[in-house]
Amino acid sequence: MATPPGFHARRAALRLLDAVLRRGETLEQALPAAVTDVRKGEDKALARAIASETLRWLTDLDALIDGATAKPLPPDAKARQVLRLMLAQWLRLGTPPHAVVATGLELLAGGPRRLAHGVFASLTKRNATLPEAPTLPVTVVQRWGERALGIAAGLSEPPPLDLTLRDPADTELWASRLSADSLAPGHLRLARGEAVEMLPGFTDGAWWVQDLAASLPARFLGAGEGRHALDLCAAPGGKTLQLAAAGWQVTALDISKRRLDLLRDNLKRTGLKAGIVRADALTWEPKHRFDAILLDAPCTATGTARRHPDVLHRIGQRQIAEMAELQARLIERATSWLKPGGTLVYAVCSLEREEGEERAAQLALIPDPVSSGELLAGLTPTPEGWLRTDPGMLPEAGGLDGFFIARWRA
């Protein structure tokens, strides 16, 4: 019997869900193996979209399933996994129920298809709905505390597409050409779903993709005027491009060959220049000191939950502690590489205090507080002069990722 159209994409989504929830993989890590038998590019995108929306709304989808079953299904039961995917397609992606049933039940061949069909039919008959904002997992709420409700409101939709311009003076020009909004000089915001490579300016290297929050750390270093900057843990290179465009002589260091190849491609496309070093920052020693160091440290990336909802379910105290230890070691090394009077900017795309505020509180350099005048409208520095962003901020403008950023002088 032939499989229904779209079945392979749904099976790939099921594989992705299993990889995240059972093996702790990221969606990006799991995607190549999950889509091996999915041929059409749009079906691969569909598989990722189904899995992403399932993970984004997982707690609420489970509540609907539990409310429609006399006996709760085990958390890892295949029937629960398939029902999660079916409900996400219907309630989040607008797939008609008959199409959801045709592809979803096929995933349970030889299993409890009647049970899954009954639960799904019951929920469609009662016109089940999801809340306005996703309900976060209990462990996440415990970590984020009073911030959790506002953050959850910012996670209900995937983010728009943000671009950083090579020349901020061209902001008005490119905003008009791309019909984009702009929240800061050198920034453009477009609706998601655009094919990036097809947009005007891509081939010419006029811009690169970079979340608005991710562009803030480099902005806090200002104009380079030919001085030397180290972009530590640089790849895939958005901040390196920013620094080079701002007149810094940039050394971009990272340990990943694949990600550095992306940086090389972007440097070639934009016509910008930087020295690239592939090395482990924990053992590498520079030949000279730097006027500025940007340490966008490896982290749990919980601040990127809008586009990577798997972090809501993969990250726990063990991963946070491991990252915090690594960040402390990187900070210690980076501070020793600054010239007297040099500037260090530390940043993480994490919402965890252990990776942000607690790391900054232990740093021994002279604080160089971020001022309100350096920030976008709607953002304010903390009393310490640090910046904390989260997905619940700037909702009318489309939100932004969660970041912690702080600045010091040697």
Image (cartoon, rainbow, N blue to C red):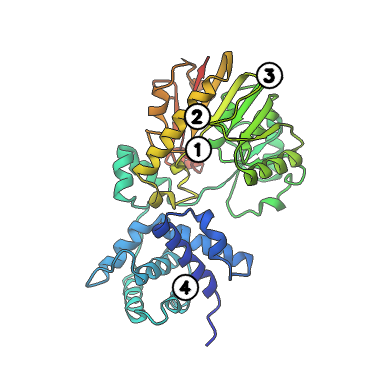
Between disc 1 and disc 3, the foreground one is 1
Between disc 4 and disc 3, the foreground one is 3
For the residues labelled 4 and 1, the Cα–Cα distance comes to: 41 Å
Disc with the residue nearer the chain's start (1 vs 2): 1
Q: Residue at x 49, y 40 (%)?
A: 401
Q: Which quadrant holds residue 206?
A: top right
The reply, left or right, for residue 323 in relation to residue 213 is: left
Secondary structure under tag 2 reads: helix
Crowding at dot 3, Cα within 10 Å, few <14 / some 14-19 / many 20+, comes out as few
Amino acid, disc 2: Leu
For the residues labelled 2 and 4, the Cα–Cα distance comes to: 50 Å
Image position, residue 266 (x, y; %) = 70, 41
Secondary structure under tag 3 reads: loop
Amino acid, disc 1: Pro
**Label 2 sits on residue:** 330
Residue sitting farthest toward the front:
283
**Label 1 sits on residue:** 298
Amino acid, disc 3: Arg
Amino acid, disc 4: Pro
Q: Which quadrant holds residue 108?
A: bottom left
Question: Which residue is nearer to you in this view: 181 or 331?
Answer: 331
- Check if mark 1's residue and mark 3's residue have beta carbons within 8 Å: no
- Check if mark 1's residue and mark 2's residue have beta carbons within 8 Å: yes
Between disc 2 and disc 4, the foreground one is 2
| Residue 96 - label | 4
Disc with the residue nearer the chain's start (3 vs 2): 3
**Label 3 sits on residue:** 227
